[in-house]
């Protein structure tokens, strides 16, 4: 094969061009996070009551949130939530108040973000970060090795080309 280049890489990016895709992806992620956190209006009182009712466990049935239960205890908790919203309490104050009204029962469906319960929130994030870091470390030094044909390979190809030109089988 005369005139063919061997050992060169085609289609690879070098210099700043290879970072453009990474920068673009970072910009998209930052914008999406910004829109997802800042772009939302504050919820109405009815939405707050519904959201709170979905995060508090029914005191009598244990397997449902008070939002989806029709037991008298759940109705009482929903009324209590409305009273506390009208009194001007924050969501955390309402959750703490409801939990204090039913001592000995774990009524909060969402684990707290502190202490041992904080691990429920932190460990998945730590695992994702560790996985991404592992992948970056594994592939950071990866470079495709240029393929070079040995003299024996070149001779074999030349022989096959000559044979096909003469109508012979290699």
Image (cartoon, rainbow, N blue to C red):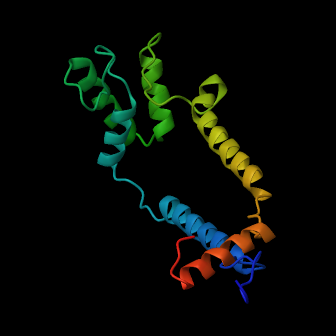
Q: Is residue 4 visible?
A: yes
Q: Position of residue 88 (x, y in %)?
A: 43, 43
Q: Residue at x 62, y 81 (%)?
A: 162
Task: Measuring from the top left, give residue 158's x and y in whole percent.
Answer: 68, 78
The total of numbered circles placed on residues is: 0
Does residue 50 appear to the left or right of 3 in the view shown? left
Residue at (30%, 27%) from the top-left corner? 66
Residue at 76 percent across and 58 percent down: it is 142
Position in image of residue 70 (x %, y %): 19, 24
Q: Residue furthest left?
A: 70
Q: Is residue 37 above or below residue 56?
A: below
Of the pair 131 and 160, the residue shown nearer to us: 160
Residue 133 vs residue 36: left or right?
Answer: right
Determine the residue located farthest toward the top in the rendered image. 104
Q: Is residue 3 above or below residue 146?
A: below
The quarter of the picture where residue 34 lies is bottom right
Q: Is 55 situated above or below 160?
A: above
Q: Quadrant of the image for the N terminus?
A: bottom right
**Could one spot residue 20 in this view of the protein?**
no
The C terminus lies in quadrant: bottom right
The foreground one among 46 and 2 is: 2
Q: As displayed, is residue 106 above or below residue 135? A: above
Please tell me which residue lies in front, 55 or 102: 55
Q: Position of residue 74 (x, y in %)?
A: 27, 23
């Amino acid at each position: 094969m005369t005139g063919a280049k061997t050992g060169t890489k085609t289609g690879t990016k070098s210099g700043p061009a290879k970072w453009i895709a990474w920068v673009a992806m970072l910009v998209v992620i930052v914008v999406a996070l910004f829109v997802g956190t800042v772009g939302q209006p504050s919820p109405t009182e009815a939405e707050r009551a519904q959201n709170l009712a979905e995060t508090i466990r029914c005191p009598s049935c244990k397997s449902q949130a008070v939002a989806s239960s029709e037991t008298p205890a759940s109705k009482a908790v929903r009324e209590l939530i409305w009273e506390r919203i009208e009194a001007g309490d924050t969501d955390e104050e309402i959750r703490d108040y409801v939990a204090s009204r039913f001592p000995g029962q774990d009524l909060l469906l969402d684990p707290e973000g502190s202490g041992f319960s904080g691990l429920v929130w932190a460990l998945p994030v730590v695992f994702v970060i560790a996985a991404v870091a592992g992948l970056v470390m594994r592939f950071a030094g990866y470079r495709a090795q240029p393929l070079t044909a040995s003299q024996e390979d070149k001779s074999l190809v030349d022989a096959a080309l000559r044979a096909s030109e003469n109508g012979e089988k290699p």
